[in-house]
Image (tube, helix red, strand yellow):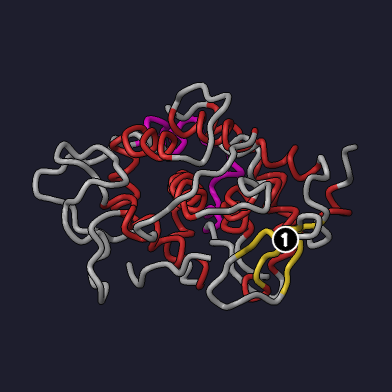
Amino acid sequence: MVKSGSVIIPDPNLRAALASLVGGPSEVSVDTIRSGLYTEVIFAELDPTSIAEVHPPGPRILFNERYRFENFSLLGVTMAHETLHQDPAISGMEEYIAYALHSGYYGQVLLEQPKLTTSGTELTRRANTALLALVNTRDAKGRQSLTANRGNVLPGAAVPLANFRSLFPADLSPATPGNPDLNAFLSAMTKTRQRNADFDQATADLLDVRLLWAPPEGRLRVAKLLQLKLPKGCPPWPQPTVPTQIPAGDQPAEATAATPVERPVESGAASPLAATAAVLSLLTLVRLRRRHRAVPGEPPRLP
């Protein structure tokens, strides 16, 4: 039975977070939530180190109350992660794979909403740190990896980390069963067709060599957004092919006034209402961009 989104997700900011997944690699999460698999998705008091958790009975998805007024796109990235957990057995391997997928997805979000990178909120800083580790983990040819050791992937961190994999315990066992959300998310992020994927070493190995969350020029742009120092001789990413201004001869009379400055979405008491009001126009833009797309820092505290 499909349930109303407002019944399962009473908070408007979390409903906007779910809606933000439409058109993205974790769009399947929308149907998963609406199917009633989770009895509720709410904010709750959690340990400060946790962003969100899946709790029995139900199960329920609980978001940490401290992130109630975060940007709904950031909460959507976490929503994509949590809907990968659909049974009581959540191992280190399951978390590792979920973090790899959602960190790549967060990189895609930044390519569409670059101002999120510098919004300065706690959730942004945590997401930036995990993405920083991902971007800096690459093989000798610059290809994305999870396990390649190219030195410390978190510049300035008190404890050097060799790669993205090093954010997690050495022993990730046991493997746990997959689900339709994993199949869909993994297929989108690796450009493969997955039907029976599990949270196991085979899936981790696939992501290690084929986490195609962005082309090289997209990863370069994200590196710049994260204020990384690019190597000498690193090629710039392509410039937009769409003109940034209307030619003078074609500009309508009413466009002669100054164009309003775009403002970033802010965290604050009014965020849920603002998110609900803006989500439809944002989703229209996101769908269009995603359909045509080729396809710094304390270590994150993992839940």
Q: Which quadrant of the rendered structure holds the N terminus?
A: top right
Image position of 38 (left or right of 233): right
Image position of 38 (left or right of 112): right
Q: Residue at x 42, y 53 (%)?
A: 172
Viewer-proximal residue among 121 and 242: 121
Residue span colored magenta: 240-261
Viewer-proximal residue among 289 and 129: 129
Q: Quadrant of residue 13?
A: bottom right
Q: Where is 141 relative to 299, above or below?
A: above
Image position of 120 (left or right of 278): left
Identify the amino acid type marked 1: Asn
Q: Residue at x 28, y 47 (%)?
A: 147
Viewer-proximal residue among 5 and 175: 175
Q: Residue 63: percent from the left, percent from the top?
A: 67, 65
Helix, strand, or loop for circle 1?
A: helix
Q: Is residue 251 magenta?
A: yes
Q: Residue 204: percent from the left, percent from the top?
A: 40, 40
Q: Residue 168: percent from the left, percent from the top?
A: 39, 59
In the rendered image, which residue does mark 1 sit on?
A: 13
Q: Residue at x 38, y 56 (%)?
A: 171
The reply to whether residue 125 is visible in this rendering is no
Q: Residue 11: percent from the left, percent from the top?
A: 79, 62
Q: Quadrant of residue 7?
A: bottom right
The reply to whether residue 293 is visible in this rendering is yes
Most distant residue in the front direction: 174
